[in-house]
Amino acid sequence: MATINDFMELDIRVGEIIQVETFEKAKKPAYQLWVDFGDEIGTKKSSAQITQCYTKEELMGKQVLGVVNFPPRKIADFTSEVLVLGVYAQQGVVLIQPEQLVKKGDKLG
């Protein structure tokens, strides 16, 4: 079982998607995302298999939650620096986002 201390080690922040590209070299359909987490953290890249539920246009400007303190992970020729969080639903991966507009970089707690 995970402990509260395990959870507290995760740095989960709110970011805004500022750029979206189709990830042609991914094994499964995916997008390359650039997410702005504000002045403290800056912009981070992520690979996300969310093409079933979102178009590139729908993702632009969307606020999302992401784990910003995982080590970078190489996926094909792309370095994913943040894990964008979503729910594995029947229709595909649905992103987790704040119910209200909040400041970029705000921390989940």
Image (spheres, helix red, strand yellow):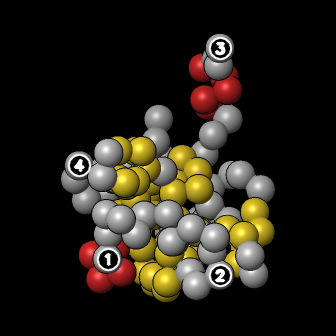
Disc 1/disc 2 C-alpha distance (Å) = 18 Å
Residue 84, position as x, y percentages in the image:
51, 57
The foreground one among 58 and 30 is 30
Whether residue 15 is visible, yes or no, is yes
Residue 82, position as x, y percentages in the image:
62, 61
Disc 1/disc 3 C-alpha distance (Å) = 37 Å
Q: Can you identify the residue that label 1 sits on?
A: 55
Circle count: 4
Q: Quadrant of residue 51?
A: bottom left
Helix, strand or loop under label 3: loop
Whether residue 106 is visible, yes or no, is no
Helix, strand or loop under label 4: loop
Judge depth for marks 1 and 3 and give the one in front: 1
The foreground one among 14 and 26 is 26
Q: Give the crowd class for mark 1: few <14, some 14-19, many >=20 residues within 10 Å.
A: few
Marker disc for residue 99 = 4
Disc 2/disc 3 C-alpha distance (Å) = 36 Å
Q: Residue at x 59, y 56 (%)?
A: 83
